[in-house]
Image: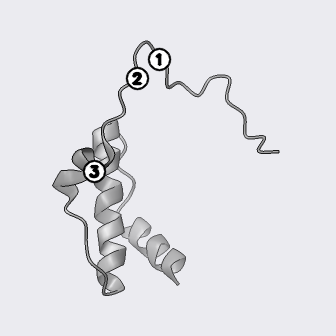
Amino acid sequence: MQAFIFLCVHSANPVQAGSQAEFSQWLCHVHNVVNRSLGKLVFPCQRVDARWGKLDCKERACDLQGSTTDLG
Protein backbone atom coordinates (compact mmCIF):
# COMPACT_ATOMS: atom_id res chain seq x y z
CA MET A 1 0.00 0.00 0.00
CA GLN A 2 2.75 2.48 0.96
CA ALA A 3 4.60 1.78 -2.30
CA PHE A 4 1.47 2.57 -4.33
CA ILE A 5 0.93 5.79 -2.39
CA PHE A 6 4.56 6.75 -2.94
CA LEU A 7 4.24 6.14 -6.70
CA CYS A 8 1.20 8.41 -6.83
CA VAL A 9 3.00 11.07 -4.79
CA HIS A 10 6.07 10.76 -7.01
CA SER A 11 3.93 11.35 -10.11
CA ALA A 12 2.58 14.57 -8.59
CA ASN A 13 5.99 15.65 -7.22
CA PRO A 14 8.80 14.97 -9.72
CA VAL A 15 12.23 14.40 -8.25
CA GLN A 16 14.15 17.57 -7.42
CA ALA A 17 17.82 16.67 -7.38
CA GLY A 18 19.79 19.66 -8.56
CA SER A 19 21.89 19.37 -5.41
CA GLN A 20 22.17 17.16 -2.37
CA ALA A 21 20.28 19.73 -0.30
CA GLU A 22 17.49 20.00 -2.87
CA PHE A 23 17.13 16.21 -3.06
CA SER A 24 17.07 15.90 0.74
CA GLN A 25 14.26 18.45 0.95
CA TRP A 26 12.31 16.77 -1.86
CA LEU A 27 12.66 13.37 -0.22
CA CYS A 28 11.52 14.74 3.13
CA HIS A 29 8.55 16.46 1.49
CA VAL A 30 7.31 13.34 -0.31
CA HIS A 31 7.93 11.24 2.81
CA ASN A 32 5.69 13.65 4.72
CA VAL A 33 2.99 13.54 2.02
CA VAL A 34 2.89 9.75 2.35
CA ASN A 35 2.89 9.91 6.15
CA ARG A 36 0.00 12.40 6.17
CA SER A 37 -2.03 10.10 3.91
CA LEU A 38 -1.39 7.27 6.38
CA GLY A 39 -2.25 9.38 9.43
CA LYS A 40 1.35 9.32 10.67
CA LEU A 41 3.50 12.11 12.07
CA VAL A 42 5.49 14.27 9.68
CA PHE A 43 9.14 15.23 9.98
CA PRO A 44 10.11 18.94 10.06
CA CYS A 45 12.11 19.19 6.84
CA GLN A 46 14.12 22.16 8.09
CA ARG A 47 15.80 19.67 10.46
CA VAL A 48 17.00 17.21 7.80
CA ASP A 49 20.65 18.27 8.01
CA ALA A 50 20.58 18.32 11.81
CA ARG A 51 19.12 14.81 11.93
CA TRP A 52 21.10 13.06 9.19
CA GLY A 53 23.93 15.50 8.53
CA LYS A 54 25.27 16.85 5.29
CA LEU A 55 27.29 14.71 2.94
CA ASP A 56 30.78 16.16 3.14
CA CYS A 57 33.25 14.46 0.85
CA LYS A 58 36.69 15.85 0.25
CA GLU A 59 38.46 15.37 -3.07
CA ARG A 60 35.72 13.17 -4.56
CA ALA A 61 36.01 10.60 -1.75
CA CYS A 62 32.30 9.78 -2.09
CA ASP A 63 32.33 9.10 -5.83
CA LEU A 64 30.80 5.78 -6.79
CA GLN A 65 33.50 5.07 -9.33
CA GLY A 66 34.82 1.59 -8.64
CA SER A 67 31.63 0.59 -6.84
CA THR A 68 29.78 -2.56 -7.77
CA THR A 69 26.20 -3.73 -7.69
CA ASP A 70 27.40 -7.24 -6.83
CA LEU A 71 25.99 -7.92 -3.38
CA GLY A 72 27.13 -11.52 -3.15
| Mark 1, residue position | 60
Q: Residue furthest bottom?
A: 39
**Looking at numbered disc 3 in the image, what kind of residue is underneath it?**
Arg
Binning the other alpha carbons within 10 Å of mark 2 as few (below 14), some (14 to 19) or many (20 upward) gives few
Q: CA distance from mark 1 to mark 2?
A: 6 Å
**Looking at numbered disc 2 in the image, what kind of residue is underneath it?**
Cys
Q: Residue furthest front?
A: 51
Q: Are marks 3 and 1 in contact (CB under 8 Å)?
A: no
The part of the image, by quadrant, that contains residue 67 is top right
| Mark 2, residue position | 57
Q: CA distance from mark 2 to mark 3?
A: 18 Å
Label 1: state its secondary structure. loop
Sequence order check, earlier mark of 2 and 3: 3
The part of the image, by quadrant, that contains residue 69 is top right
Label 3: state its secondary structure. helix
Asked if residue 3 lies left or right of residue 9, the reply is: right
Q: Are marks 2 and 3 in contact (CB under 8 Å)?
A: no
Choose mark 2 or mark 3, whichever is in front.
Answer: 3
* Image point (19%, 62%), residue name: 44
Relative image position of residue 33 (x, y in whole percent): 31, 73
Q: Residue furthest top?
A: 59
Label 2: state its secondary structure. loop
The part of the image, by quadrant, that contains residue 70 is top right
| Mark 3, residue position | 51
**Looking at numbered disc 1 in the image, what kind of residue is underneath it?**
Arg
Q: Are marks 1 and 2 in contact (CB under 8 Å)?
A: yes
| Type of colouring | one colour
